[in-house]
Amino acid sequence: MSRRRTGVIFGVFVFALCVAWSATVAAAPGANRTEAAKAAKATSGARHEQMARKSAALIAASDTQGLAAHLRQLKSDAALDDAARERLLRETVLELAKLTPQSDIETEIRSLSGYQTKAWIIEDEHGHPERFPAYDVAAAARFVEQRWQETTARKTAAAAIGRADTAVVDRYISGSATERQGFEEAFAAATPERVAIYADDLERRLAAGAPVAGLARVVALASGDEALLEAVILDAPPQEALRALATIDPAGGSPGTLTILAAAAERDATASVALLKMAPLATTDASARRLLFDALDGPHGASAAAALARGNDPGIIDELAELLRNSDDELQRRRALLALRLTDNERSRDHLRAFARGPETPTSLLAEVPSWLRQ
């Protein structure tokens, strides 16, 4: 056999081997996930490109009836390998989130939400093989269903707000988490005057334990209703209360800010955040400063110490040093020491040096002073 013929045969063999590897790499144990995904895309070929162009054209035309038929064709097209088919299905389905759903396409998306993956990628996870869908069609379909639900709910709520329909709150309560998200987006986009009429009803429902915390938070912010915002912070489940608390800007100058923060500081779930948010007020508002000093020996005293330290205020530093020297409460002294350490300027360091060198400084507290300040 000639060397040239041998080279040709070898080249054909290598080519065939590469094709076979590309087609099966998604199922190869230990395959790198990123490289396997690239290889799966490489197997797509002309048929994939043809069908991808058809998907794009149908989506551009918002042809939901044509898209429903196209999805059915993709599921059964024998000219597509599994990886190419599932890539096309996933990418086409995700684009549908932008369209207004119609019954024909909704039926197809509902069926795809239970799609059984055929193209898998297998990775070695700490010595154990773990497999992942190369293109998760079912997850994409469920995502689109959720976005459609959210969009429909948002439009429904916007229409209800426009006609001042108070029954929209009942529909919010009975809706799914996705639908509630759409309702909240509609209220957030409405004018303050439109949403203000719902504030009193939401405050009553919140106090009664109704699941309206998310909507109440949105209405409070959209309408500027501080009473409702305070009700959310005090009565809502912790997650919503913290989300509401995060929106408060202490530097904004609202006279009710400190009242809300002081109330939040009495609730265990929100106390730490509330105390930290008082930091900008401590240097200008005597009431805020007093609240923080009074909280030093409480369960959230470390947060109060951090808030007092943030302003680098000479008066606050001197008062902390006085507490450190003379308080009878060891926990309060520890928190004062913590605040001085967190302040970390020359004034606070001078106080710590003097405390460390004092003849009556307890050993337990001396250990809290940085060693380089004890010398």
Image (cartoon, rainbow, N blue to C red):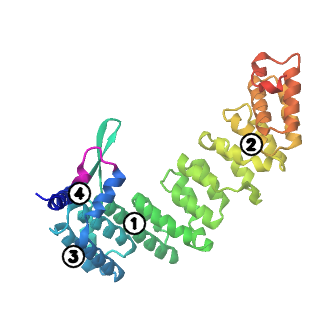
Relative depth, front residue between 368 and 37: 37
Q: Viewer-nearest of labels 1 and 4?
A: 4
On the image, the x and y values in percent for residue 363 come to 78, 16
- For the residue marked with disc 2, what is the amino acid? Ala
Magenta range is: 24-32
How busy is the neighbourhood of tag 2: few (under 14 within 10 Å), some, or many (20 plus)? many
The CA span between labels 3 and 2 is 62 Å
Closer to the eye: label 3 or 1:
3
Few, some or many C-alpha atoms within 10 Å of disc 1 (few <14, some 14-19, many ≥20)? Answer: many
* Residue in front for this viewpoint, 348 or 327: 348
Which is more foreground, mark 3 or mark 2? 3
Q: Which residue is mark 3?
A: 69
N-term mark: 3 or 1: 3
Element under disc 1: helix
Which of discs 2 and 4 lies nearer the camera? The answer is: 4
Q: Does residue 180 appear to the left or right of 5 in the view shown?
A: right
Membership of 25 in magenta stretch: yes
Residue, disc 1: 147
- Could you tell me if the residues under marks 1 and 4 are in contact, i.e. CB atoms within 8 Å? no
Q: CA distance from mark 1 to mark 2?
A: 41 Å
- Do the residues bearing badges 2 and 4 touch, measured as CB atoms within 8 Å? no
Residue that appears at 73% across and 50% down: 259
Residue 149 lies, with reference to residue 130, above or below; the image says below
Q: What whole-number distance in Å separates the C-alpha atoms at marks 2 and 4?
A: 63 Å
Is 285 located above or below residue 252 in the figure? above
Which residue has dot 4 on it? Answer: 18
Q: Secondary structure at mark 2?
A: helix
Determine the CA span between mark 3 and mark 1: 21 Å
Question: Disc 2 marks which residue?
Answer: 307
Gap in Å between the C-alphas at discs 1 and 4?
41 Å
